[in-house]
């Protein structure tokens, strides 16, 4: 699915940005992002060890916000090209933020080429709810000129707000067990 730049933060360095999600087995969610950009115009951290770290959204990162119909609670996942990641839970729109403990860290596979970056994330041992998921797939990009770009499947009115439930437009049915 195509991600769109926020109208107040155009980022012409990005030539395309796509994302998708799918459920595998009853306890694995897979998230994919594919970024195309003019080579040399984006700030992308070098790959590192990859650890849990807050504040990834301040620079380049891919993000997923996952909720279910009928509840205001949701989870947030952030993934940096450095390999760092973060996971949080909320009771409602930006309310009661808590660190989300995972049984296993996310499995990230990055593929880099000039002008291209692809990320596939598997969230193993992450029990999927028995009801459908509503997901917002987003990205924050930073240019070498210091400008920020905010990309999403859908932006709510106003300032960029990936937490807003109006952005959770990708619907997934949970997989059937067995």
Image (spheres, rainbow, N blue to C red):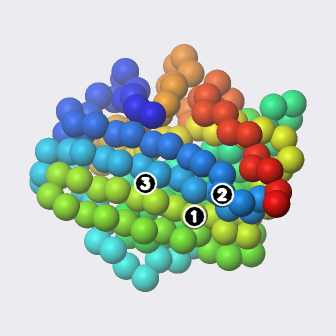
In terms of image quadrants, where is residue 27? bottom right
Labelled pair 1, 2 in contact (Cβ < 8 Å):
yes
Of mark 3 and mark 2, the one earlier in the sequence is 2
Q: Quadrant of the C terminus?
A: bottom right
Q: Work out whether residue 84 or residue 116 is closer to the camera in this orientation and state it.
A: 116
Residue, disc 1: 122
Is the residue 111 above or below the residue 105 in the image?
above
Task: Looking at the picture, tell me which residue is in the foreground, 66 or 159.
Answer: 66
- In the rendered image, the vertical position of residue 103 relative to residue 168, given as above or below: below
Q: Which residue bears the numbered disc 2? A: 24
The mark found on residue 61 in the picture is 3
Residue 74 falls in image quadrant: top right
Mark 3 to mark 2 CA distance (whole Å): 24 Å
| 106 horizontally vs 131: left or right | left
Q: Whole-percent x and y of residue 90?
A: 77, 48
Q: Give the vertical position of 24 relative to 64 (above or below).
A: below
Residue at 64% x, 39% y: name it. 135
């Amino acid at each position: 699915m195509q991600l769109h730049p926020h109208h107040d933060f155009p980022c012409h360095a990005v030539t395309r940005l796509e994302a998708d999600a799918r459920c595998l087995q009853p306890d694995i969610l897979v998230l994919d992002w594919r970024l195309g950009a003019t080579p040399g115009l984006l700030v992308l951290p070098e790959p590192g060890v990859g650890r849990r770290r807050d504040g990834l959204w301040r620079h380049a990162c891919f993000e997923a916000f996952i909720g279910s119909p009928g509840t205001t609670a949701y989870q947030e996942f952030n993934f940096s090209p450095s390999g760092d990641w973060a996971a949080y839970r909320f009771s409602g729109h930006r309310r009661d933020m808590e660190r989300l403990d995972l049984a296993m860290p996310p499995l990230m596979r990055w593929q880099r080429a000039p002008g291209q970056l692809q990320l596939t994330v598997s969230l193993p041992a992450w029990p999927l709810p028995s009801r459908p998921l509503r997901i917002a797939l987003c990205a924050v990009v930073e240019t070498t000129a210091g400008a920020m770009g905010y990309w999403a499947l859908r932006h709510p009115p106003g300032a960029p707000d990936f937490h807003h439930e109006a952005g959770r437009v990708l619907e997934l049915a949970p997989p059937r067990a067995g």
